[in-house]
């Protein structure tokens, strides 16, 4: 498999090179695509230097901070243009350990999408305040309730997609961001019949830099998931008796 790890960046100058080195050591055959949203701290220039030195590193520059979802959609399009078989989402800040990526890739032998999960047995978080854990657990519980999505951690951002899944998803119509973007993609993949599995990971709170979490991201996730749940239920209720339901 040709594997591409897509890493969106915004002001991650101090984190990028260490995480890239760890990724290459953990999975030498994987390629890295840094999608930089015009970081004012010079992250894009650091990425350019890495790509100039290493044939497995690539950079996609964007002119403004347009959000996590848009950055990933751009990275997915780049992966398809360059004919990769597997596309991985991973944070730049060290929260996702590249050393755990082989476990996700191995799980693709029996799946179309693999999620690195904090909330399945064996998964855990490090250095999180209680409110962050409560927010994540509560958000995932609401996602399961609203959407009927049978996943412990639908909001996590460490995951691997087989190429045919991304080819089938309407990525140009995805406008959600943050946690909501992650829920959006996996929900669409699950509803389309793709097999989604979870493997445990350890999520580590960033050491350098500031978290991109914001109240706006939380609010967006809450109202979008609620709206999707309501409209999906209405669609099922309108089906004639005996008709198939998503």
Image (spheres, rainbow, N blue to C red):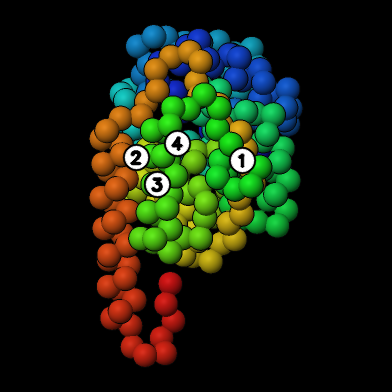
Around disc 3, counting alpha carbons within 10 Å, would you say few (fewer than 14), some (14 to 19), or many (20 or more)?
few
- Left or right: residue 29 compared with residue 79: right
Q: Is residue 150 above or below residue 53?
A: below
What residue lies at 40% left-to-right and 23% top-to-bottom? Answer: 211
Element type at marker 4?
helix
Q: CA distance from mark 1 to mark 2?
A: 24 Å
Judging depth in this view, the residue of 52 and 13 nearest the camera is 13
What residue lies at 37% left-to-right and 54% top-to-bottom? Answer: 142
What residue sits right under mark 1 in the picture?
Answer: 123
Q: Is residue 102 above or below residue 53?
A: below
Q: CA distance from mark 1 to mark 4?
A: 13 Å
- Left or right: residue 139 compared with residue 19: left
What residue sits right under mark 2 in the picture?
Answer: 177
What mark, if any, has residue 133 been given in the picture?
4
The mark closer to the camera, 1 or 2, is: 1
Around disc 2, counting alpha carbons within 10 Å, would you say few (fewer than 14), some (14 to 19), or many (20 or more)?
many
Element type at marker 2?
loop
Around disc 4, counting alpha carbons within 10 Å, would you say few (fewer than 14), some (14 to 19), or many (20 or more)?
some
Q: CA distance from mark 3 to mark 4?
A: 8 Å
Q: Is residue 138 above or below residue 15?
A: below
Q: CA distance from mark 3 to mark 1?
A: 16 Å
What residue sits right under mark 3 in the picture?
Answer: 138
User: Which quadrant of the rendered structure holds the N terminus?
Assistant: top right
* Callout 3–callout 4 Cβ contact below 8 Å: no
Q: CA distance from mark 2 to mark 4?
A: 20 Å
Q: Earlier in the sequence, mark 3 or mark 1?
A: 1
Residue 135 seen: yes
Q: Is residue 167 above or below residue 135?
A: below
Judging depth in this view, the residue of 233 and 161 nearest the camera is 233
What residue lies at 69% left-to-right and 23% top-to-bottom? Answer: 24
Give how far across and how far down residue 172 sits, in percent.
Answer: 36, 48
The mark closer to the camera, 2 or 4, is: 4
């Amino acid at each position: 498999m040709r594997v591409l790890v897509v890493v969106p960046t915004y002001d991650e100058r101090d984190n990028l090179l260490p995480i890239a080195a760890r990724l290459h050591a953990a999975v030498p055959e994987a390629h890295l695509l840094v999608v930089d949203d015009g970081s004012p701290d010079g992250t894009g220039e650091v990425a350019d230097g890495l790509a100039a030195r290493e044939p497995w590193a690539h950079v996609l520059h964007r002119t403004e901070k347009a959000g996590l979802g848009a950055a990933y959609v751009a990275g997915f399009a780049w992966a398809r243009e360059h004919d990769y078989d597997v596309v991985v989402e991973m944070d730049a800040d060290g929260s996702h350990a590249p050393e755990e990526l082989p476990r996700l890739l191995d799980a693709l032998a029996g799946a179309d999408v693999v999620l690195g999960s904090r909330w399945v047995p064996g998964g855990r978080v490090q250095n999180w305040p209680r409110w962050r854990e409560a927010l994540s657990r509560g958000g995932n519980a609401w996602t399961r309730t609203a959407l009927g999505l049978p996943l412990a951690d639908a909001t996590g951002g460490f995951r691997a997609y087989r190429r045919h899944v991304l080819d089938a998803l309407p990525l140009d119509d995805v406008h959600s961001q943050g946690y909501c973007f992650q829920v959006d993609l996996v929900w669409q993949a699950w509803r389309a019949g793709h097999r989604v599995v979870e493997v445990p990971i350890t999520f580590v709170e960033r050491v350098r830099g500031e978290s991109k979490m914001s109240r706006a991201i939380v609010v967006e996730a809450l109202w979008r998931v609620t709206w999707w749940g309501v409209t999906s239920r209405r669609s099922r209720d309108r089906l004639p008796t005996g008709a198939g339901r998503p």
